[in-house]
Amino acid sequence: MTAKTPLIELRDLQKHYRINKGIFGHRTRGTVKAVDSISLSIAPEETLGLIGESGCGKSTLSRVLLGLTPATGGEVLYDGRPVNRRTLPQFRREAQMIFQDPYSSLDPRMNIEDIIGEPLRVHTRLDRKARRDVILPLLEQVGLSEDALSKYPHEFSGGQRQRIGIARALVLEPRFIVCDEPVSALDMSIQAQILNLFAEMKKTRRLTCLFISHDMSVVKHISDRIAVMYLGHIVELAEKEELFRNTLHPYTAALMNAIPVPNPALRRKIEPLPGDLPSPIDPPPGCPFQTRCAAAQERCRREMPALNELLPGHFAACHFCKGGVGA
Ligand code: ADP
């Protein structure tokens, strides 16, 4: 936690889905704890990377955070004030999202001027001419020319579409941006261009960001701090350099092992993560990572480890990792 008031604070945020069975769906089969009591904060102008395998709850967390889907429990604070029915309209304006798939997130029936201008039409009283005055310089900043205005999404490449997605997310001059896997649908060469564009926009506009990815090398490139998520829980949280220097949680170590290293001599000697993410429906008690952890012991099957500060500013939820209560 920094000395400044966080721009975003999550307190015990939960999103549980009830899964029903029976032809009328009247019997409850179980509960998916997609997000389970997550507390974290993001300081002004900070970029928090959120990493974890597909299905661990990253998108659900971002949707609940932005008020796009209601939480089952807990609360979100924006600039020190709870986001509720009264404060949601301002929050919606100041908090925007860049989506994963630039192919499906842009309406194919709208031209680029209407796509980028839509948030202005909804949230301001600017007329078409005034909206264009806002859109044109923005279009230039994201690397597109004026003649893009009258074109449709299918006339652009994936990278160009993501530039359009970034322009749309920035048009209301937000303070906070959630990027949900913004480059994972793009070719490697284009990924670097889009990440660099985003990093530049972030700096010049002094944005606060939650940057979600399943790819540690992408998160490493863009983040100040990194939160590692597993089965609805944050299992490790630290400044980027600290996380790489003193990795505490075995799940984080396995994710780092998955980063491609071109030189075989430098490849880490950590075993790859065995098996898939277990079913999130009614997980057993204890540590959520116990079924895939080579170091799991009896205590891990009984007791859920808390996210404790094991080194200064470095939190991990593990009974036995370095500095932990059981070490
Ligand atoms: P990620 O973004 O990390 O891939 P998600 O947030 O999409 O993960 O999903 C987390 C878990 O919640 C998954 O097990 C997924 O199946 C489940 N889930 C997501 N949305 C729903 C829903 N509407 N109903 C039931 N389960 C859901």
Image (cartoon, helix red, strand yellow):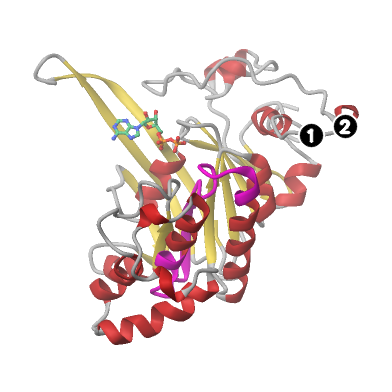
Separation of disc 2 and disc 1 at Cα?
7 Å
The tally of labels here is 2
For the residue pair 194 and 144, the one nearer the viewer reads as: 144
**Which residue is labeled 2 in the image?**
266
Q: Which quadrant does ligand 1 occupy?
A: top left
The label number, if any, that marks residue 302 in the structure image: none
Instruction: Specify the quadrant that holds the C terminus.
Output: top right
* Circle 2 SS class: helix
In the image, the segment drawn in magenta is 167-191
Placement of 100 over or under 94, stated as above or below: above
Q: Quadrant of residue 85?
A: bottom left
- Whichever of labels 2 and 1 marks the residue nearer the N terminus, that label is 1
Q: Residues within 10 Å of mark 1 (few under 14, many from 20)?
A: few
**Which residue is labeled 1 in the image?**
261
Outermost residue toward the right in this view: 265
On the picture, is 139 further left or further right than 261?
left
Placement of 91 over or under 235, stated as above or below: below
Identify which residue is drawn at 47% across, 65% down.
176
Mark 2 touching mark 1, by CB under 8 A? yes
**Residue 151, how many percent across, how many down?**
35, 64
- Indicate if the residue with disc 2 has its beta carbon within 8 Å of ligand 1: no
For the residue pair 26 and 277, the one nearer the viewer reads as: 277
- Is 184 one of the magenta-colored residues? yes
Placement of 102 over or under 203, stated as above or below: above
* Circle 1 SS class: loop
**Residue 240, how many percent across, how many down?**
71, 50
Outermost residue toward the left in this view: 24
Q: Residues within 10 Å of mark 2 (few under 14, many from 20)?
A: few
Identify which residue is drawn at 76% across, 48% down.
242
Q: Amino acid at mark 2?
A: Leu
**Residue 222, how many percent across, how many down?**
65, 55
